[in-house]
Image (spheres, helix red, strand yellow):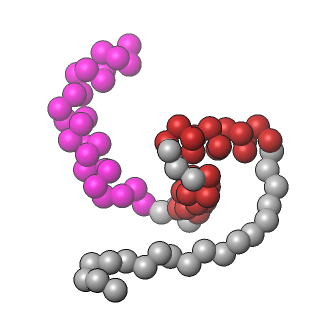
Amino acid sequence: MTKGARMAPTREKFASQADPEILAAMRAVAAEEGRQLQAVLEDAMREYLARRSGAAVDPAVAEALAASIAEFDSLYERLAR
């Protein structure tokens, strides 16, 4: 393996069922983003588990939000009206 190359993560197949409308919406998201359905579902599962565990907000996201509020506070207040 070359320096800096990464191995693909191992995947485990499983079977499940979903509401047809939800599955169609997930397929539409995957198509819109040019991604595979499995990648979109995996992201959704990660987000669900993070919310469920009470995971904290990514510090970079919190910092970006704080900077945005500091810069655009008056605009946000006007938009809220």
Nearer to me, 55 or 1: 1
**Residue 45 visible in the snapshot:** yes
Q: Is residue 22 left or right of residue 11?
A: right
Nearer to me, 79 or 29: 29
Label total for image = 0
Above or below, 24 against 74 in this view is below
Q: Residue at x 80, y 44 (%)?
A: 19
Outermost residue to the left: 71
Residues shaded magenta: 56-81
* Residue 33 pos. (x, y %): 49, 42
Q: Toward which corner of the image does residue 66 lie, by quadrant? A: top left
**Residue 48 visible in the snapshot:** no
Residue 60 among those drawn in magenta: yes
Q: Is residue 79 left or right of residue 13?
A: left
Q: Residue at x 62, y 52 (%)?
A: 37
Residue 27 among those drawn in magenta: no
Q: Residue at x 32, y 50 (%)?
A: 61
Nearer to me, 34 or 41: 34
Q: Is residue 27 left or right of residue 61?
A: right
Above or below, 16 against 29 in this view is below
Q: Residue at x 40, y 56 (%)?
A: 57
Nearer to me, 48 or 18: 18
Above or below, 21 against 12 in this view is above
Q: Toward which corner of the image does residue 1 lie, by quadrant? A: bottom left
Q: Is residue 79 left or right of residue 34?
A: left
